[in-house]
Image (tube, grey):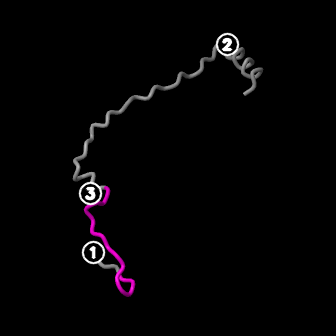
Amino acid sequence: MSDQLRDQLKKYKKKHGIKSPSPKKKSKKDNSESYSRSEIESLMGMNRPTYKRGPGGAYKQK
């Protein structure tokens, strides 16, 4: 926005008594959830079986 237009807008608002809305404040949320080590490992997939390709292209468990 140009400076001239901004000045005109300020004068218009002052003349007509228009107030700009104040920005809303965001409230901070506390992260009260805590996960155990085993829960984090299961979410990351560390406890899943691993597979590899076998003869003929079939997947086999290691």
In space, the residues marked 2 and 1 are separated at their CA atoms by 76 Å
Within 10 angstroms of label 2, few (less than 14), some, or many (20 or more) residues?
Answer: few
Quarter holding residue 42: bottom left
Which mark, by number, is residue 14? 2
Kindly report which numbered mark, 2 or 1, lies closer to the viewer in this rendering: 1
- 6 left or right of 45 in image: right
10 Å neighbourhood of mark 1: few (<14), some, or many (≥20)? few
| Residue receiving disc 1 | 62
Residue holding disc 3: 42
Task: Reply above or below: 45 against 22.
Answer: below
- Residue interval drawn in magenta: 44-58
Name the secondary structure under disc 2. helix
Per the rendering, the mark at residue 25 is none
**Is 30 included in the stretch rendered in magenta?**
no
Instruction: Kindly state the secondary structure of the residue where label 1 is placed.
Output: loop
Which badge, 2 or 1, comes first in the chain's sequence? 2
**Which image quadrant is residue 26 in?**
top left
Tell whether position 53 is magenta: yes
Residue 19 on image: x %, y %? 60, 17
36 versus 1 height, above or below: below
Q: Residue at x 67, y 16 (%)?
A: 13
